Amino acid sequence: MTVVLVVTVVYENPVLELAQLTASIHRGAASVGHTANIVLVVNDDRPAVDFDGLGVTVVAGEGNVGFAAGVNRGIEMFEDPFIATINPDCLPDDAAFGAFINAVTQAEGLVSALLLDAHGEVDYRKYENWVFSIQHRIAEGRCRSFFTRGHEIDLPGWAKAPGTALGGARATVDALGGMFDSAFYLYGEDRELNLRARRAGVPIRVERRSGIRHVGGESGRDRPHLVSRAQADSAIRFAYRAYGPVGARVAMLDQWLLAALKGAWGRPGAGRMRSAARWAAARWRGSSGEAEPLNAVELTGAAP
């Protein structure tokens, strides 16, 4: 029986929903002859005792360290041979989790679950992989075609394996230098992992038999300014990793132009996006190389 370490980073998700999710993961793993060793990394201020009875290991009391750092903290807890991340806003589905966990134990590289929206339709947008906004629509069209018209399992270079439900052998992850880079506080960490995997020639596949439903975006819905700042920083940081200092500068300009266009079109959130773009650009212009990683203090201090 193979043990798969499953890390879930929690931020104000209801305990009852987490109980249903973790029980479903346990049952799904057992149904395919494996064991799920689940670690909940709690990024809010709840004590570990709040999660008693869930049959999981809880890491709590360290504050909001960000998603990537939270995943890495969970991975450090054990040395199981296979690793998977599952977001807390995935919906319970024993069969889907079983298919995904089984695929993780057989993966030659990295493997993503097939993500569905709450209505059960393929959420192809989660796989879009682009750096600048001009590439966005192209990536959307390609991903829509790939996931709705074909049956290929090898993800093309213009698609990414999202961190929502992603895994592989620990040896593969270690060879890539770890799962997610903690410099990405929120957003962009899966794109950066995919970039490293592509450069190293590591296969990236999707397990089409899994079909995990994902609600998405629940934890940051009431903190739009925090989310906007994190998105702005991660976009510049990823462009820097992909194309160096020039890429970072282009990403800053790209964000400013996109915010200006949204404002001209009267789109909601344009002012918040413009404010976040200015804030992120100031951080990066004041750095001699890659800007320092974000932290919770900077993000929660976002202007209303």
Image (cartoon, rainbow, N blue to C red):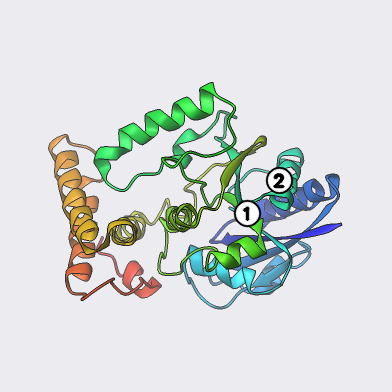
The mark found on residue 103 in the picture is 2
- Picture quadrant of residue 192: bottom left
Label 2 Cα crowd, 10 Å radius (few <14 / some 14-19 / many 20+): many
Quadrant where the C terminus sits is bottom left
- Give the residue drawn at x 29%, y 61%: 240
Residue furthest to the front in view is: 201
Q: Position of residue 100 (x, y in %)?
A: 69, 45
Name the amino acid type tagged 2. Ala
Whether residue 43 is visible here, answered yes or no, is no
Q: Secondary structure at mark 1?
A: strand
Q: Which residue is mark 1?
A: 167
Q: Position of residue 106 (x, y in %)?
A: 73, 49
- Tell me if 201 is positioned left or right of 26 in this view: left
- In this view, the residue in front, 191 or 39, is 191
Name the amino acid type tagged 1. Gly
Q: Position of residue 130 (x, y in %)?
A: 35, 44
- Give the residue drawn at x 61%, y 74%: 60
Give yes or no for contact between labels 2 and 1 (Cβ–Cβ under 8 Å).
yes
- Tell me if 26 is positioned left or right of 46 in this view: right
